[in-house]
Image (spheres, grey):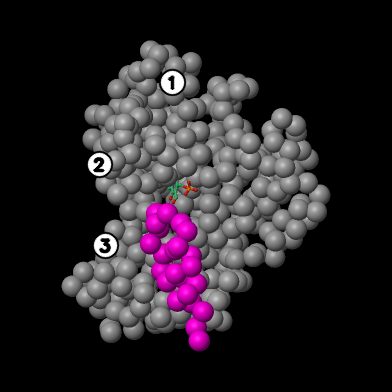
Amino acid sequence: MLRTPAAVQDAERHTAHNYHPLPVVISSAEGAWLTDVDGRRYLDCLAGYSALNFGHRHPTLIAAAHAQLDRLTLTSRAFIHDQFADFCRELAALCGKELVLPMNTGAEAVETGIKVARKWGYQVKGVPDGAANIVVAEGNFHGRTTTIVSFSTDDDARADFGPYTPGFRVVPYGDLTALSEAVDEHTVAVLLEPIQGEQGVVVPPEGYLPGVRRLCTERNVLFIADEIQSGLGRTGATFACEQAGVVPDMYLLGKALGGGIVPVSAVAADADVLGVLKPGQHGSTFGGNPLACAVATEVVRLLATGEFQRRSAELGERLHTGLRALIGKGLVAVRGRGLWAGLDIDPALMSGREACERLMARGVLAKDTHGSTIRLAPPLVITADEIDHALTQLAAVLAS
Ligand SMILES: Cc1ncc(COP(=O)(O)O)c(C=O)c1O
């Protein structure tokens, strides 16, 4: 008898229903493959929403975690530990920035970015106290805190969580004129995803990100790039901004930074920006803990080789070529970059959820977003043959 149905029910019984997972119960994983409680294997085409860029249980990362578990796991930032300096120095170097501030979740990195930008606005730019505004984009996804959902345009994320945090202006994504009109003398930052992941891997028009960069420089506004999902190799470069030839004032990082083992996020910026924070003004008990730093330092070293960015660029070509061939055969549009794709399924055929359930039955795990869209974000260790396998299964689902 299969164990999955009872295990699914069990998992739902004592939890809030704030997710709608596929009815699969995973018990182990390696590389790009997952195994469920009934021993069935699945190709992971979601990679923990890009938290598993290096695959499940990458040997280097697991070894670093094991070694650190045997020595020291937590000190709090009340004391300095011996993993901290390497992590901060190497991550700052990877980002081309002077300083980093480690936190845990992506939402915390975003909150940190907002706080730093506001303080920078008051202390450096000279914005009158309490008057700072930050311009954000329609369709954004930056996390789930009360402040972050205050400027979400997704009703599911925002409705009934008010009163909302003021100080944000929302403009259409990709529209430089609207952005320019929204920025005024009290604007401290423009906060954007260089590619909107949750919205369905939406790539902005050519010239948009360089235009944002120019505008921010001209108007003395910080450009904050939320690379929590787009960064660290996902798009075929270390940062999606890099592919647009743009350097933001602040990077927000998370997900893959923890190597799929621990939650690690960070803000990276130069000292004239991150330097505004003084003791007591921001922090987190677990932020920058020894275990997190030991794993994340190895993540940074993996990225420093360039191998994962290259894989994502090369294999991404294969993925996108295969996906484009399915346009008119069940797909109506494909977007994305590197090993990251948003597919719009013909809504007359099936919903995104239904497509994911059918893919699951064929041993491929992906996740729908917004109705008929599916996001594919396999681990960057996936092989060419495995990509072909996923494409074959997708074609079969669309033809069924
Ligand atoms: C672009 C972006 N920013 C922030 C977040 C929030 O990260 P977390 O779920 O770790 O809080 C996400 C998560 O999906 C994201 O995609």
Q: Is mark 1 within 8 Å of ligand 1?
A: no
> Which residue is painted at 42% across and 82% down in the image?
362
Position of residue 291 in the picture relative to residue 215 (left or right): right
The magenta stretch spans which residues? Answer: 1-23
Q: Nearer the viewer, mark 2 or mark 3?
A: 3
Crowding around mark 3 (Cα neighbors within 10 Å: few <14, some 14 to 19, many 20+) is some
Residue farthest bottom in this picture = 1
Reply yes or no: does residue 11 show up in magenta. Answer: yes
Q: Is residue 239 visible?
A: no
> Which residue is painted at 42% across and 54% down in the image?
16
In this rendering, is residue 331 above or below 399? above
Q: Which residue is mark 1?
A: 121
Q: Position of residue 197 (x, y in %)?
A: 39, 54
Q: Which residue is mark 2?
A: 172
> Which residue is painted at 39% across and 37% down in the image?
146
In this rendering, is residue 353 above or below 223? below
Q: Return the disc, 2 or 3, that comes first in the chain's sequence.
A: 2
Amino acid beneath label 2? Pro
Q: Position of residue 14 (x, y in %)?
A: 47, 59
Q: Is mark 3 within 8 Å of ligand 1?
A: no
Q: What separation in Å lies between label 2 and label 1 (alpha carbons)?
A: 24 Å
Find numbered disc 1 in the image and state the secondary structure of the residue it sits on: helix
Q: Position of residue 337 (x, y in %)?
A: 41, 59
Reply yes or no: does residue 107 show up in magenta. Answer: no
Find numbered disc 2 in the image and state the secondary structure of the residue it sits on: loop
Which mark, residue 371?
Answer: 3
Q: Return the disc, 2 or 1, that comes first in the chain's sequence.
A: 1
